[in-house]
Amino acid sequence: MRDKMRKYLLLGIAMACHAVPALAGEAPSKSYTIEQLMDSDVIGGLSWSPDDKKLIFTSNRTGIANIYEMPSGGGKATALTNSVKETVNAIGYFPADARILFSSDQGGNELAHIYVREPGGTTHDVTPGAKHVARFVEWAQDGKSFFVQTNERDPRYFDLYEIQADGYAKTLLFENDKAYQVRAVSPDRRYVGLSRIVDNATKHCYVYDRNAAKLIQLTAEGKPVACEPQVFAGTRAGTGAQLFYTTDDGGEFAFLVRQDLSTGDRVTVFKPEWDVEGANLSRDGGTLIVSVNADARSRPYLFDAATFKPRPFADPMPGASVGLLLANHATKALVSASNGATPGEILLLDLASGQRTPLLNARAPGVAPGDLVAGEVVRFRSYDGVTVPGILYVPKGAKKGDALPAVIHVHGGPGDESRIGYRPLQQFLANHGYVVFEINNRGSSGSGRTFYHLDDRKHGDADLDDVVAAKKMLAATGYVDPAKVVIQGQSYGGYMTLAGLAFRPDAFAAGVDIYGVSNWPRLLANTPSWWEDLRRLLFTEVGDPAKDAEYLRKISPVFHAENIKKPLLVLQGANDPRVLPVESEDIVARVKANGVPVDYVVFNDEGHGFRKKANQITAYRKILDFLDTHVKRAAAKAPPAEQASISPLGDFPIGQ
C-alpha cells in the first residue's frame, strides 16, 4: 500500500546464502570526498512550455534549489530564479504562456505559498498570508485557472480555491470541515475528488457534487480500504463524470479503477502485482500514464485512455527507478532513471521511434560512475519467519572475510519505504568502506497491506527486531563484522535509532539519529495544526496521548535513556515543525549524563529534512567522522557469523 499520505511523520536460513552479484574480485573504487559526491545535481519540477519547445526544472547544483529554463531539444540552461536563502520548487508553466508557478517556504518551516513568476522576472504571492500553508492541486483542463488548497480559514482544514490565470482572482469552491484531502477537480468544476483518513487501516474516497451540494462516498463503510482519487476523465466541460482512483479493496496492493459517477459502474483499469502509486492523463486526454511501485522501483506504463490498451514503452534502464513526463502534444516525453549508483539522468524520448536523447546530466564532475554502487533489492527471513526486504550497497572491491563495518538505515514514516535511487550519504558511506542496508522493516509500504500493518502498536519492538535480525543477514554475506553494525535513520528512522540503543542496548555499535522522535506523548500532543487528518492516523497506529499515555512512555527512548551506552550522533533542524528541537535536546542531555560519547549538530536554517547542499555536506561529513571514530577503528572482533539467507530480486513470492 504505497499511499502518498504515508509521508506524514516526520512527521519510508533454509537456503544457501546468495553471493552479492558483481562485487567479489572487483578493484576497489577511488575514494571521494563528500564535496565531490555532492557536486551532483538533484533535478525536479520538470515542465514543458505550452508549445513544447522549452523546459523548466529545479536544480540544486549551486547549493540552493532554483528554477532553470532550457530548449526542450537540448542546449544551455538559464537560471530564472537566483534565491540564495530559500529553496524554490517549480510547479510548471502556465498552459498558454511563459509565466511559471512555483512554491517556497521560509527556512524549512513548511508554511509554503504559491508564487507566479512573470516573464520579466517579477514574482507575486498568489496565496498571501502570515501563518497558513498553500498546496497546489492541479490546473483546470481549459488552462484558464488553477486550483489550490489552503488552511487560511481554519488552521486544521484545507479549503479548495480556484485562482484565475488572468488577474489571479480567487474563488472558494469547497469549504472543508472534516479534514478531507483535495485530490482532483473535474473539467467542468462540478465535482471535487476527495480522500479522508479514518484510521490507520482506512482511507475513504469521496466525490463532492458542487451543483447538488452533495458528498458521495465511493468506498464501502466499515471496510478497511486505502483509496486515493487520481484524475477526472474528460476533455471538455460536461464530460468529467468519470473518476480514476486507486484502491486496495479486497487485496494486498493498490490497483487503478475508473468509476462512472452517474451510473456507479466501476471498471478495473490496471491491476499489477505491485502498488499502483499514481495516474494522470495527457493534456489532450488521450493517454493514461500510470506509475507502479515495482519492488522499490517506480515504473511508468502508458495506456490508451479510452480502451486501456497498453502503448509500447521501452524500459530505459532495467533495474532502475524510472519517471516519465509526457509533452503537451504527447509525441515526446521526458524520462528520468536511476539505479542508485548515479543521479537521475534526464532523457528526451521520442514515443514513436523510441529514440532517446540525453538532455541533462546530473552526475558529479570527476566522479566515475563505475566507482559508485547500484542498489540491490534483497530479502531475508526475520526473527519470526517474516520475509523482510531492503536495498543493499556493498563497497566495490569488498572480499569475503573483510569484516567491514555496516550501517542499517531506517526510513521515515513510520510507513514509508526506501526506494532505489541516488542518495549521496549512502554512496559516501559505501565509498569509504561501509556496507549499507536500507531496511524496509515490517510496517513499511510497498510490500502489501498485511506487511504494512505488522507493526501497528508495536513500534520500537516488532519493527526494531527486524533491524536486529538484519545483522545476521549482513554477517552471512561474508563482508560484515556483526560487532560493527550501526543503526541510523531519519525522522521515524531516527526514533528507531534511539529505540535500538535504549531497548536493545547491546545490539548495535553506535547510532545516528537524524531529527528523530524521543518522546511520543509530547510529539503526538503537539502535532502541527495542519495535521488534523494525519493525527487520526498517528493516534490509531502509534497511540493516543490521552488514552495511551503509559504505553507511549514505555516506547519513548527519552524515558529509558539510562540504558543507552553506545556512542550517539544527533542531527536536528532548528525550524522543524514536526519533530521539535526539544526532542533532540532532551535525549542528548540524558545520554550525556550516562557518560556516553554524544555529538549534537543543529542547523539553524533547516526544518524537517536538510535541503541546503552546504548543510548536507556538513551533516554527511560529520556522520562519516563519527562512524570512523567510534566504529570503524574499533578493535572488537566478531564471533563466527550465523548463516542466514539473502536473495536477489524475485526469490520470494510477492507479498510474502
Image (spheres, helix red, strand yellow):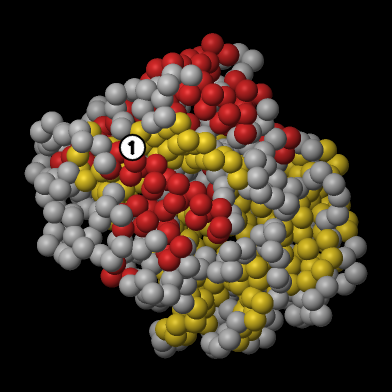
Task: State left or right for residue 439 relative to residue 161.
Answer: left
Q: Disc 1 residue type?
A: His
The residue identified by callout 1 is 630
Q: Which residue is drawn at 83% across and 38% down?
A: 154
Task: State left or right for residue 22 relative to residue 121.
Answer: left
Residue 504 quadrant? top left
Locate residue 165, reporting x and y percent: 83, 70
Q: Which residue is drawn at 70% across and 76% down?
A: 80
Instruction: Tell which of 518 and 618 is nearer to you.
Output: 618
Q: Residue furthest top?
A: 550
Res. 384 visible in picture: yes
Locate residue 147, reporting x and y percent: 76, 59
Q: Residue at x 54, y 72 (%)?
A: 325
Q: Which residue is drawn at 45% across and 31% down?
A: 598
Residue 259 quadrant? bottom right
Residue 46 quadrant? bottom right
Task: State left or right for residue 481 relative to residue 591.
Answer: left
Instruction: Tell which of 321 and 362 is nearer to you.
Output: 362
Instruction: Tell which of 467 and 622 is nearer to you.
Output: 622
Disc count in the image? 1
Locate residue 627, reporting x and y percent: 35, 42
Neighbours of disc 1 within 10 Å: few (<14), some (14-19), many (20+): some
Find numbered disc 1 in the image and state the secondary structure of the residue it sits on: helix
Instruction: Tell which of 217 and 75 is nearer to you.
Output: 75
Locate residue 121, reporting x and y percent: 79, 76
**Which quadrant of the rendered structure holds the C terminus?**
top left
Res. 455 visible in picture: no
